[in-house]
Amino acid sequence: MNRCDSARKFSLLQRRASLLPPVQFSLTALAETASGRRSFKISLADGRASDKAHRNFRREGIIRALITGLGPVAMNLRRQKLAAAMLRTAITLLLALTATLPAPSAWAGGDATSGLPVPRFVSLKADRVTVRGGPDKDHDVSWIYTRVGWPVEITAEFENWRRIRDADGSEGWVYHSLLSGKRTGAVQMKSKTDLAPLYAKPDDKSAVTAQLQVGVLGTVKRCTGAWCEISGTGFDGWIAQNELWGVYPNEKFE
């Protein structure tokens, strides 16, 4: 073949090659031979097909990543909702239980304060009433009353304790349950040897039915502000209101 024929064939191959689509290829190292040479894999692929496959792979990878990542998030949300529901139920049960419990003062055996006027007269409910130096059982015992029904005056209240004062002016603290609202009166005179006349009517002109010694105790039925009707063992009548310990001057009640 002469030089002109070779030139024509080379030109023809160039034109044919220009008509083919672009080709991508890659060299991938497969192994190294014993002689130290490496063998390579040549991969030829259409560029558009490669891009499409790559996009599909990326899309599938993103979807898998989203599913994998959202799984724990959804589970955490379900756990949080369950925990919130359990907390609401517990709070509701606690509130319902608290509403049914008595107040702390009720556990102690009565109201913290009576709500009644202070000062006021009451009487001893038991035949043994311990009087302490303060509103607590840890305080020392000051003295002990042994006469049931004796009138005393409440001068202060603290929780379930009452500070009382007797006819001698002595004061101390007693537990509220040892006192009664029953009104009683004890005869008091300027001199212990004096006698208090008991009348048939609230009038010093009426008949005298008895003479009462200092300290005689009776139940006060009513008072007019000047006279009180009292009764006791062997007597019943009217006495001047200022001759009784257990009622206030000018006090009226039925």
Image: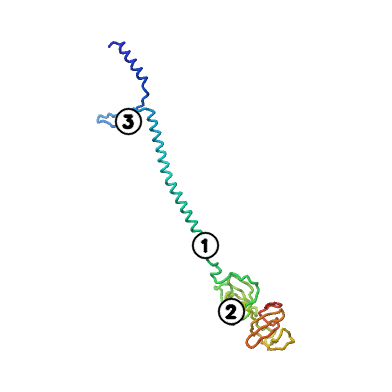
Residue bearing mark 1: 96
Quadrant containing the C terminus is: bottom right
| Dot 1 amino acid type | Ala
* Residue 69 image position (x, y, % from top left): 42, 43
Against 57, is 209 above or below?
Answer: below
Q: Amino acid at mark 2?
A: Lys
Q: Residue tagged by mark 2? A: 125
Residue 131 in which image quadrant: bottom right
What distance separates the C-alpha of mark 2 from that of mark 3? 110 Å
Q: Residues within 10 Å of mark 3 (few under 14, many from 20)?
A: few
Q: Which of the colour schemes (rainbow, by chain, secondary structure, one colour) is used?
A: rainbow
Residue, disc 3:
28
Q: Residue 161: percent from the left, percent from the top?
A: 59, 72
Left or right of 248, for residue 30: left
Residue appearing at x 25%, y 29% in the figure: 35
Tell me, yes or no, whether the two marked residues, 1 and 2, touch with CB atoms within 8 Å.
Answer: no
Q: In the visual, does 65 lie left or right of 139?
A: left
Query: Mark 2 or 3 closer to N-term?
Result: 3
Q: Residue at x 47, y 51 (%)?
A: 81
Q: Toward which corner of the image does residue 218 lie, by quadrant?
A: bottom right
Secondary structure, mark 2, is loop
| Kind of element beneath mark 1 | helix
Q: CA distance from mark 1 to mark 3?
A: 76 Å
- 98 or 174: which is nearer to us? 98
